[in-house]
Image (cartoon, rainbow, N blue to C red):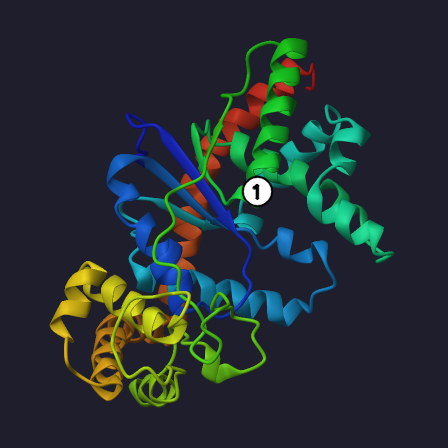
């Protein structure tokens, strides 16, 4: 089985959290697609991490399959990248234990999620305490060079570096030391009803969000209801005209056209024309994603095959790293 090795390795893992939004796609996932040609990419659906909180088993399975289908629908290519489900590669859990033996209590206790929830008196599991160590295992298994993360996740990559450096010093050179990279953020899409806040998939008002599963009719209805203002002029001014500016941002990101050109093309027109343009732009992006997503969800055998094939490719590299770590630690 051929594996890509001549490029730097990029690793990204995301928990299966449910529906993805237009904001998720335009702000992040869309930017992953060209990375597949630049790096040897590993994209992991981190379903083991999903159980760090109280999670229904059926829901985890459903969300895992949906997220895999949606990643494929958005353009992640199993011929270019290794796309897999974390629980199908047993080496993640095994290396996590070895790294736990080389992680200090103080280090783990300083990680944000555990610290924040503990401070609020929330009864947390040991999994939440040690999940940054599992994250370190995720990264280190694949000789990772680059880990694209948000600002809030940089500390986890720093912990990974510390654990790997300590291990290498104690047992000999075993792990590649990865580097966190905070990628340039794509379009910052705000809510349709509250354009001052980020479009979030957990929002209480579904009209505030465009999901990548939404029908053309749903998209049309939601954008028709989008908040604008009383100025009546199409202008990019996020402070004074956040609703109009958000729709202009959406058009710009969907059409790959600079915002100033979008504004110029709509000069002298009303907000109805703005919403019509935004609707067409969003549908042109979402419809093919939705159709590919529906294909995979209606062909689960194909989805399971891709997951299994990806796991097998991941396991080849993961097993070599795990063997090296066990040998270094004197484990038979």
Displayed quadrant of residue 37? top left
Q: Where is residue 298 in the image (x, y as percent from the top left)?
A: 37, 77
Residue 190: which quarter of the image?
A: bottom left
Residue drawn at (35%, 90%) of the image: 221
Q: What element carries label 1?
A: helix
Residue 130's image quarter?
top right
| Residue 78, position as x, y percentages in the image | 31, 50
- In the picture as drawn, the residue positioned furthest to the left comes out as 265
Q: Measured along the vertical axis of the image, is residue 259 above or below residue 319?
A: below
Seen in the picture, residue 268 relative to 260 is either above or below; the reply is below
Specify the quadrant that holds the N terminus.
top left
Left or right, 141 with respect to 101, comes to left
Mark 1 residue crowding within 10 angstroms, few (<14) / some (14–19) / many (20+):
some
Q: Which residue is rendered at x = 73% and y = 23% of the image?
A: 102
Residue closer to the observer: 98 or 286:
286
Q: In this view, does 171 lie above or below 111?
A: above
Residue 13, position in %: x, y? 50, 47
Residue 54 shows up from this direction = yes
Question: Residue at 22% of width from left, 84% of height from top?
Answer: 276
In this rendering, is residue 293 above or below 125?
A: below
Q: Mark 1 points at which residue?
A: 153
Along the line of sight, which residue is nearer the eye, 35 or 254? 254
Closer to us: 19 or 121: 121
Q: Quadrant of the C terminus?
A: top right
User: Would residue 78 appear left or right of 105 to someone viewing this image?
Assistant: left
Q: Residue at 30% of width from left, 68% of height from top?
A: 250
């Amino acid at each position: 089985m051929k594996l890509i090795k001549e490029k730097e390795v990029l690793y990204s893992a995301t928990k299966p959290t449910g529906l993805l939004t237009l904001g998720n796609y335009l702000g992040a996932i869309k930017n992953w697609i060209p990375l597949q040609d630049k790096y040897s990419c590993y994209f992991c659906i981190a379903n083991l991490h999903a159980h760090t909180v109280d999670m229904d088993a059926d829901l985890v399975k459903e969300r895992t399959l949906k997220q895999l289908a949606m990643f494929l629908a958005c353009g992640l290519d199993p011929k270019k990248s290794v796309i897999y489900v974390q629980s199908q590669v047993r080496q993640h859990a095994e290396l996590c234990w070895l790294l736990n033996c080389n992680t200090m209590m103080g280090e783990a206790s300083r990680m944000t999620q555990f610290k924040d929830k503990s401070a609020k008196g929330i009864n947390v599991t040991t999994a939440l305490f040690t999940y940054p160590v599992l994250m370190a295992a995720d990264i280190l298994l694949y000789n990772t060079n680059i880990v694209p993360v948000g600002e809030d996740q940089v500390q986890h990559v720093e912990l990974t570096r510390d654990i790997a450096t300590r291990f290498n010093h104690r047992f000999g050179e075993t792990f590649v030391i990865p580097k966190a990279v905070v990628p340039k953020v794509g379009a910052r899409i705000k809510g349709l009803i509250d354009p001052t806040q980020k479009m979030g998939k957990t929002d209480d008002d579904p009209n505030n969000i465009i999901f990548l599963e939404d029908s053309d009719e749903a998209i049309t209805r939601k954008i028709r209801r989008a908040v604008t203002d009383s100025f009546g002029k199409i202008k990019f001014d996020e402070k004074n005209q956040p609703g109009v500016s958000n729709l202009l941002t959406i058009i710009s990101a969907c059409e790959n056209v600079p915002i100033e050109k979008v504004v110029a093309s709509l000069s002298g027109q009303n907000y109805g024309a703005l919403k019509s343009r935004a609707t067409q732009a969003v549908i042109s992006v979402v419809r093919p994603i939705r159709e590919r997503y529906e294909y995979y969800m209606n062909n689960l055998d194909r989805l399971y095959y891709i997951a299994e094939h990806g796991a097998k490719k991941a396991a080849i590299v993961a097993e070599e790293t795990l063997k090296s770590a066990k040998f270094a630690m004197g484990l038979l």
